[in-house]
Amino acid sequence: MTTLSPLQIERLKYRPKLPASLDINAIELIEGAPTTAVRDADKIQELFKNTYGKPIVTFKKGAAAENAAMNVGVILSGGQAPGGHNVIAGLYDALKQANPQNKLYGFLGGPSGIIDGKTIEFTDEFIGKYRNTGGFDIIGSGRTKLETEDQFKKSLANCQKLGITGIIIIGGDDSNTNAAMLAEWMIDKGIQVIGCPKTIDGDLKNDQIEISFGFDTAVKTYAELIGNIQRDANSAKKYWHFIKIMGRSASHVALEAALQTQPNITLISEEVEAKKMSLEQIVNYIANIVDKRSEQGKNFGTVIVPEGLIEFFPEMKTLISNLNDIMPELEHDPDYANATSTGEQFNVVLNRISEENVKVFESLPVSIKIQLLMDRDDHGNVQVSRIDTEKLLIEMVQIKLDAMKSQGLYKGKFSAQAHFFGYEGRCAFPSNFDADYCYSLGYNAAALLSNRLTGYLSSVKNLVRPASEWVAGGVPLTMMMNIERRHGTDKPVIQKALVKLDGPVFKALEKNRENWAMNDDYVFPGAIQYFGPAAVCDAVTKTLALEQA
Ligand code: FBP
């Protein structure tokens, strides 16, 4: 990449802001009370004998002190999120400030890099090319699960070869669950492990972690695009736009994008699940609004669909879980493997799934059936980003409206466009918020290492205030864990934060959605701004503002 865009040239010069209290050479560690786990404390304690129960820590300015030299390795894990490069830049700068002898290595291609010993050593020049840029291409990312004894042993050997005594894992809930396991395993081998909260999905958050990095930039990117589409819809007045928004399971991204743009219809997976709404009910809900708007001469509108919606319909959830269970067997079934048509494949599936699921599977369009049978991810989950839920809804709403029309109940015109905004937002130039937050998280991770901590997640709080007032520290990973059933086995995992239906963010949607359905109260956020008034450039998301109010 030798040709730089004008924005890239300017962004390379941006100096991310740090909390005023964070100076790796003059820092004091304040310890809180011992912690427990969010649930299943006894079991978590049993599994994490050495790292369980540690206190939450915060940093404040302290007396100047010298830092011993150390070598550190960093891993980018899972889906890309804007700001990952700045976590590494912050980490690198802190390590070099602490002791110029310190070395930072990057494990290439995600967690597999530490297992296979594929590394690169960072230098000023190399890091300099990636400051304030989006993407994870600096060292690459991957979804390998770091969890077996054999993988841990190989990782240890690779760290020892390079004299690495600190590992930083930048990842979401699953990757940080693995960080907790690695920290526990490495504790008597002299290697510390620290996590950093990453994911555009915004579902790695709790009382201690206000938001995961990348959420801010990704939602602002999607909101810009939705705003543009709404203006197009309102100009041409001829299309209904069904927009699927990324976010594997939680609907935080869709909800925030909706609050920023005020579309006509917003579906929230968590509400669908809580109210046990079927696909048919949702289709009727949309068709009803389409009909009412058409009575006002408005044959256009916008519908926001969270990516994970399909798994939240009770009947689909049961079907998908049944499919997940039979997938490993199906791969070895000659009838399935040798099937010459999708129809034949479907028959094999129909013979294997339970009776209640047969009807649901048969009711789906062929394209969705094929998508439901596609490869699972490393965690055995269906890859929802590859399921065209927005197209499924369009097809079913069309069928419903046709039926209504034939009974004389609907007289409008329905012409729909499908969109999926996901990958567009994951590697955008980080907003000023994410650039600062990520740099602080990385810098802070180095401070946690230099204070001899392990099994902690780097935390930076008070995020609605100016960066100088942010509070840096660490949260024990075990504090966020509980036991969940995953593919038939009980596993310790970091609890995922879903949208709270009694929380202020959902309430803000609930209060307004009837109005937004009928009136075109669209908001056009425009592109993320990096230079200009703070009210525009440093604005936090509505989710963060409402939750931290
Ligand atoms: P992480 O949880 O690893 O941050 O990834 C989240 C995500 O971006 C989801 O929103 C999306 O469903 C998924 O990754 C897509 O995964 P992939 O990049 O493997 O297609």
Image: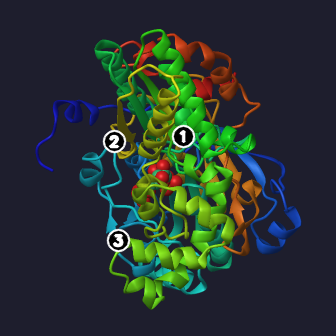
**Image coords of residue 510 (percent x, y):** 67, 23
**Image coords of residue 408 (percent x, y):** 51, 23
Distance from mark 3 CB to nearest ligand 1 atom below 8 Å: no
Tell me which residue sits at (40%, 72%) in the image: 343
Q: In the picture, which quadrant includes the C terminus?
A: top right
Callout 3 amino acid:
Thr
Tell me which residue sits at (50%, 70%) in the image: 378
As displayed, is residue 399 above or below residue 49?
above
Circle nearer the N terminus (2, 3): 3
| Residue at image mark 3 | 119
Are dots 2 and 3 in contact, CB under 8 Å?
no
Distance from Cα at disc 2 to Cα at disc 1: 35 Å
Circle nearer the N terminus (2, 1): 1
Instruction: Give residue 317's quadrant in the image.
Output: bottom right
| Residue at image mark 2 | 424
User: Viewed as shown, does residue 452 lie left or right of 396?
Assistant: right
Residue 23 numbered mark, or none: 1
Residue 466 numbered mark, or none: none
Distance from Cα at disc 2 to Cα at disc 3: 28 Å
- Which mark lies nearer to you, 1 or 3? 3
